[in-house]
């Protein structure tokens, strides 16, 4: 009989090293915390395939302007995404009268440098996780191979024991489809495929 005893850890226990898809070459890259014990730590992205790296999350803004031309009152609607610095003024040529005028736009801070894909992603750079797959319309994911192994131990277990917890643990928050014995065999097959990735 396979037995699993909860180690009373949360999903954040596995966040020190997160495997992601490199934004440049789409191969496996790693996001690591610069200060492993800090939840708010700056992070570093490194790809061993193309050697792309980034340290920290750089500010990115969406610059928006909604107003009327000061010459002909035509509507002006401008949206410029992924701007690296705040813009106090921008020069806009009116599409109606052709006059160029400086306007003060709104600078909206963008949380993610990379465009979200809809896949599970890391919460710092917003890059798709490497260890993820679809399971019957649900997203199965793990931050790294240790996380994947912990999930595997839980899913394989016939007997799952709590361990005098003081807070909600990661396995207690797992969705029902992952806890269900009827999905065990298919989930283990999926995990085995991800282990080889």
Image (cartoon, rainbow, N blue to C red):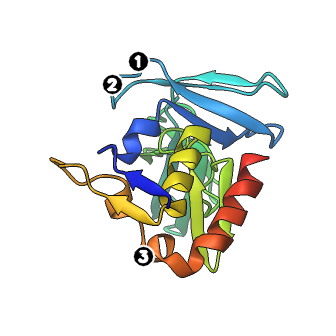
Can you identify the residue that label 2 sits on? 38
Q: Are marks 3 and 1 in contact (CB under 8 Å)?
A: no
SS under mark 1: loop
* Mark toward the start of the polypeptide (3 vs 2): 2
Asked whether 85 or 128 is in front, the reply is 128
Please tell me which residue is depicted at 46% across the width and 45% down the height of the picture.
Answer: 111
Q: CA distance from mark 3 to mark 2?
A: 31 Å
Q: Comparing marks 3 and 1, which lies closer to the viewer?
A: 3
SS under mark 2: loop
* Mark toward the start of the polypeptide (3 vs 1): 1
Q: Is residue 61 left or right of residue 194?
A: left
Can you identify the residue that label 3 sits on? 176
Residue 69 can be seen, yes or no: no
SS under mark 3: helix
Residue 81 can be seen, yes or no: yes
Asked whether 51 or 13 is in front, the reply is 13
Point out residue 170 in the picture as x, y percentages from the top left corner.
36, 53
Quarter of the image for residue 144 reads top right
Please tell me which residue is depicted at 52% across the width and 69% down the height of the picture.
Answer: 75
The crowd level at tag 2 (other Cα within 10 Å; few <14, some 14-19, many 20+) is few
Please tell me which residue is depicted at 51% across the width and 30% down the height of the picture.
Answer: 57
Instruction: Tell me if residue 19 comes above or below residue 142 in the rendering.
Output: above
Q: CA distance from mark 2 to mark 1?
A: 6 Å
Can you identify the residue that label 1 sits on? 35
Q: CA distance from mark 3 to mark 1?
A: 34 Å
Point out residue 138 in the picture as x, y percentages from the top left corner.
57, 74
Point out residue 188 in the picture as x, y percentages from the top left corner.
65, 63
Asked whether 68 or 45 is in front, the reply is 45
């Amino acid at each position: 009989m396979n037995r699993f005893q909860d180690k009373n850890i949360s999903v954040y226990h596995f966040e020190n090293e997160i495997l992601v898809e490199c934004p440049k070459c789409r191969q496996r890259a790693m996001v690591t915390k610069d200060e492993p014990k800090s939840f708010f730590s700056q992070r570093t992205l490194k790809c061993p395939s193309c050697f792309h790296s980034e340290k920290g999350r750089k500010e990115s803004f969406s610059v928006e302007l909604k107003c009327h031309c000061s010459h002909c009152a035509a509507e002006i609607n401008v949206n410029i995404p992924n701007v690296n610095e705040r813009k106090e003024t921008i020069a806009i040529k009116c599409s109606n009268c052709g006059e160029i005028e400086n306007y003060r736009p709104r600078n909206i801070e963008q949380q993610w440098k990379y465009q979200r894909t809809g896949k599970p992603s890391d919460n710092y750079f917003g890059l798709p996780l490497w260890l993820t797959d679809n399971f019957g319309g649900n997203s199965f994911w793990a931050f790294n191979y240790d996380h994947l192994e912990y999930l595997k131990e839980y899913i394989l277990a016939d007997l799952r024991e709590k361990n005098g917890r003081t807070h909600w643990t990661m396995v207690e928050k797992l969705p029902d489809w992952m806890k269900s014995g009827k999905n065990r065999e298919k989930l283990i097959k999926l995990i085995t495929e991800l282990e080889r990735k």
